[in-house]
Amino acid sequence: MLPDSATIQSTLRKAVAALTGVVLALVLLTALLITGFYLLVNAATLALAPLVGKPGAMAITGLACLCLLALFFYRMTRPARKLRDNESKSSDSGAGSPVDTLRLLIQRNPLEAALMAFAAGVVEQGDPRLKNLLLQGGMTLMRQSAGTGSPQSDKSEDAPSRSTDNSPAE
């Protein structure tokens, strides 16, 4: 038996109400967290003011906040221990070229690399100089991956520079 439209509408209303409730709860909790942090910093400043003066108290609490922020970003940018151990083992075997490092990075993070390429393409799609530069870089990388030292790759090096000169004059 198929559900009627009243049942579907009430279910949809309940789902929208639940989603709205979750979003409002997250917003309120975030506001409480920020307000609590502000009040904590304000209380620390007021507590230190009789000891070192108001400017000194503000400087100390500001330095403490900056240290917390630096610690947060340090922890966020540091790779995980397992990944660091793997990288140290691979770097001990021999330092690769920057292109090899970039290829390894793209292989490890394909979605992020695709997202960055898409973002760069959207942002700079109207710039013909960047387009030519990217095409030349891509051709160079393709030649390197195909193998250098063949006589055909030496002859084809002049071709991209001639084809990129056909860009419209500004």
Image (cartoon, rainbow, N blue to C red):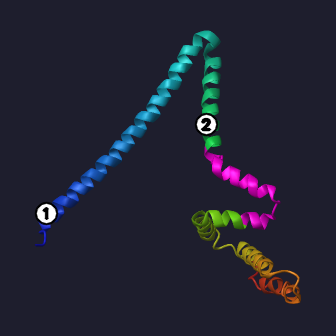
Look at label 2 and name its amino acid: Leu
Report how far apart the C-alphas of labels 2 and 1 lie in the structure: 50 Å
- 12 is higher (above) or lower (below) than 18: below
- Mark drawn on residue 69: 2
Q: Residues within 10 Å of mark 2 (few under 14, many from 20)?
A: few
The quadrant in which residue 126 appears is: bottom right
Inspect this view and state whether residue 114 appears: yes
Say which element carries label 2.
helix
Q: Is residue 12 left or right of residue 38?
A: left
Q: Is residue 36 left or right of residue 137?
A: left
View extreme (top): residue: 50
- Residue 148 locus on image (x, y percent): 85, 80
- 78 is higher (above) or lower (below) than 15: above
Inspect this view and state whether residue 79 appears: no
- Mark drawn on residue 37: none
The quadrant in which residue 74 appears is: top right
Q: Residues within 10 Å of mark 1 (few under 14, many from 20)?
A: few
Whether 168 is among the magenta residues is no
Q: Main secondary structure of the magenta part?
A: helix
Say which element carries label 1.
helix
Q: Quadrant of the C terminus?
A: bottom right
Ranked by sequence position, the earlier of labels 2 and 1 is 1
Residue range (magenta): 76-102
Q: Quadrant of the N terminus?
A: bottom left
Identify which residue, 24 or 151, lies in the foreground.
Answer: 151
- Mark drawn on residue 7: 1
Q: Is residue 44 left or right of residue 149?
A: left
- Residue 141 locus on image (x, y percent): 77, 76
Look at label 1 and name its amino acid: Thr
Residue name at image x 75 percent, y 63 percent: 101
